[in-house]
């Protein structure tokens, strides 16, 4: 089975103190520490486990600048067979649809049975997987927390739905899945593994390589633009409730009653 996993280089929330840029429309990214998106790690681990069981190859792909290559090498050290960097000045400022358009062009250059993405990335939109599937006209499932390979033509997937319930579906291949955290335990990547892939060649593809018109992706084509980015002001009168869960619930009920919210 040929599996393509879409990954992203994002700011590491454990290693950074975030500040806004001077324009107030993004983070100040000059000195941030980056790592692979957490959700994507689970997608890569799931792809590796599938290939371990049924055979095939795992390719990781990312849209970004030269520094995004480190994310690909990290996932290759984890066990992915190949990496592809999609990088072009024309891609800068792309919104979710633009990223999905770029990824679609790469998918169509290959012969993949399964495309995986993380359920969401750093901006929390959770939209690229669904857009990519729609553009490819492939079956799609989101919030996937279980995958069962059932032959060469279909797979069974479990989804987390409202109320903590589990939903099982059968999807024809090829298809796109957005993987939820907790589906597995991503394996540890050691220094030896990183050194092993340090000199492997990673192809870099731009708009012309993918057959894309630069005007259809990037900032010029983006229909969604961030116009403001701010930290909410601290509210007045906030009160922290202490105690066990039952004690906090009891206190909360009393306060709601005192405000006329409960009879």
Image (cartoon, rainbow, N blue to C red):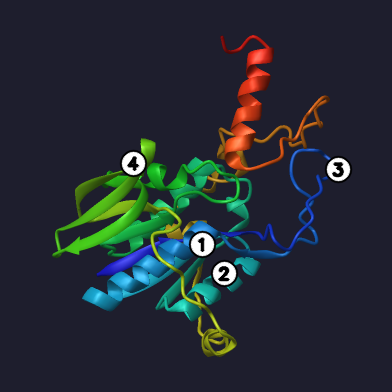
Q: Residue at x 77, y 30 (%)?
A: 239
Of helix, strand and loop, which one carries label 4?
A: helix
Disc 2 + disc 4, Cβ < 8 Å? no
Label 1 crowd bin: few (<14), some (14–19), many (20+), radius 10 Å: many
Q: Earlier in the sequence, mark 4 or mark 3?
A: 3
Q: Residue at x 81, y 32 (%)?
A: 234
* Residue identifier under label 1: 62
Label 4 crowd bin: few (<14), some (14–19), many (20+), radius 10 Å: some
Of helix, strand and loop, which one carries label 1?
A: strand
Q: CA distance from mark 2 to mark 4?
A: 26 Å
Of residues 244 and 196, the one nearer the viewer is 244
Q: Which mark is residue 71?
A: 2
Q: Quadrant of residue 66?
A: bottom right
Of residues 127 and 50, the one nearer the viewer is 50
Of helix, strand and loop, which one carries label 2?
A: helix
Q: Residue at x 34, y 58 (%)?
A: 115
Look at discs 2 and 1 and give the one toward the viewer. Answer: 2
Report x, y in % for residue 190. 56, 84
Q: CA distance from mark 3 to mark 2?
A: 28 Å
* Residue identifier under label 3: 22
Q: Quadrant of residue 145?
A: bottom left
Disc 3 + disc 2, Cβ < 8 Å? no
Disc 2 + disc 1, Cβ < 8 Å? yes
212 with respect to 55 (left or right): right
* Residue identifier under label 4: 134
Q: Is residue 51 above or below residue 226?
A: below
Q: CA distance from mark 1 to mark 4?
A: 19 Å
């Amino acid at each position: 089975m040929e599996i393509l996993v879409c990954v992203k280089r994002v700011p590491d929330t454990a290693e950074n103190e975030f500040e806004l840029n001077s324009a107030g429309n993004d983070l100040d990214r000059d000195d941030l520490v980056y790592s692979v998106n957490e959700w994507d790690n689970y997608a890569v681990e799931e792809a590796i486990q599938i290939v371990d069981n049924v055979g095939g190859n795992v390719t990781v792909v990312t849209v970004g600048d030269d520094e995004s290559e480190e994310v690909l090498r990290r996932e290759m050290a984890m066990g992915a067979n190949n990496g592809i960097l999609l990088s072009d000045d024309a891609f800068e400022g792309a919104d979710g649809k633009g990223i999905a358009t770029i990824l679609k062009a790469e998918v169509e250059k290959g012969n993949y049975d399964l495309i995986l993405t993380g359920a969401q990335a750093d901006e929390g939109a959770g939209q690229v997987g669904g857009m990519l599937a729609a553009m490819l006209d492939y079956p799609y499932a989101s919030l996937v927390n279980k995958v069962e390979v059932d032959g060469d033509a279909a797979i069974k997937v479990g989804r987390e739905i409202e109320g903590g319930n589990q939903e099982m579906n059968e999807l024809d291949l090829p298809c796109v899945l957005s993987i939820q955290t907790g589906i597995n335990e991503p394996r540890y990547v050691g220094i030896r593994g990183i050194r092993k892939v340090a000199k492997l060649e990673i192809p870099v593809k731009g708009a012309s390589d993918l057959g894309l018109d630069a005007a259809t992706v990037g900032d010029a084509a983006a229909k969604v633009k961030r116009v403001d980015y701010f930290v909410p002001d601290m509210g007045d009168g906030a009160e922290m409730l202490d105690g066990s869960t039952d004690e906090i619930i009891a206190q909360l009920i009393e306060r709601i009653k005192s405000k006329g919210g409960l009879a």
